Image: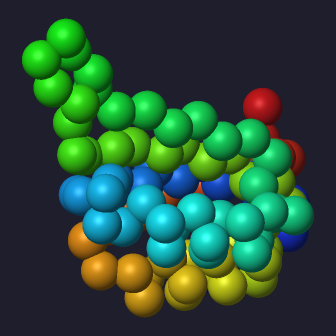
Amino acid sequence: MLMEDSFVVAGIRIMDRIKEAGRTQQVLSKHAPVIQSRLGFHEVTEAVCSRVGLVVLHLRDAGSRWEALRDDLDKIGGIEVKVMTFNRSQP
């Protein structure tokens, strides 16, 4: 459980953007109020556009709102979520 005085940086790896990006987008939109910033990218070359994507989220005052987002993300097959939690009270 996260404390209200913490913030979270989460990485979401989408194994198949074509298949899972739509569901992932729906979950992120549903939980937009907890998302402070978001960065998404995938490898693109002249020859290929990667099906694997990565989304980085910065969430503030996450607490139980982050847990609800994480629960919804966990219901999507084909993605992996990694999390770093920072305590605001420490320099």
Residue 84 shows up from this direction: no
80 or 89: nearer the eye?
Answer: 80
User: Seen in the image, is 25 located left or right of residue 34?
Assistant: left
Q: Residue at x 54, y 86 (%)?
A: 71
In the image, residue 5 sits, relative to residue 4, either above or below, namely above
Q: Position of residue 35 (x, y in %)?
A: 77, 55
Residue most extreme to the top:
46
Q: Position of residue 39 (x, y in %)?
A: 59, 35
Count the marks: how many?
A: 0
- Find residue 78 and report its image quarter: bottom left
In the image, residue 44 sits, relative to residue 77, either above or below, namely above
Q: Residue at x 55, y 84 (%)?
A: 72
Residue 26 shows up from this direction: yes
**Quarter of the image containing the C terminus?**
top right
85 or 26: nearer the eye?
Answer: 26
Residue most extreme to the left:
47
Q: Position of residue 28 (x, y in %)?
A: 65, 65
37 or 84: nearer the eye?
Answer: 37
- Find residue 50 and report its image quarter: top left
Q: Residue at x 62, y 72 (%)?
A: 26
Q: Position of residue 6 (x, y in %)?
A: 77, 57
User: Seen in the image, is 21 located left or right of residue 37?
Assistant: left
**Quarter of the image containing the N terminus?**
bottom right
Residue most extreme to the front:
47
Q: Residue at x 27, y 22 (%)?
A: 44
Q: How is the image coloured?
A: rainbow
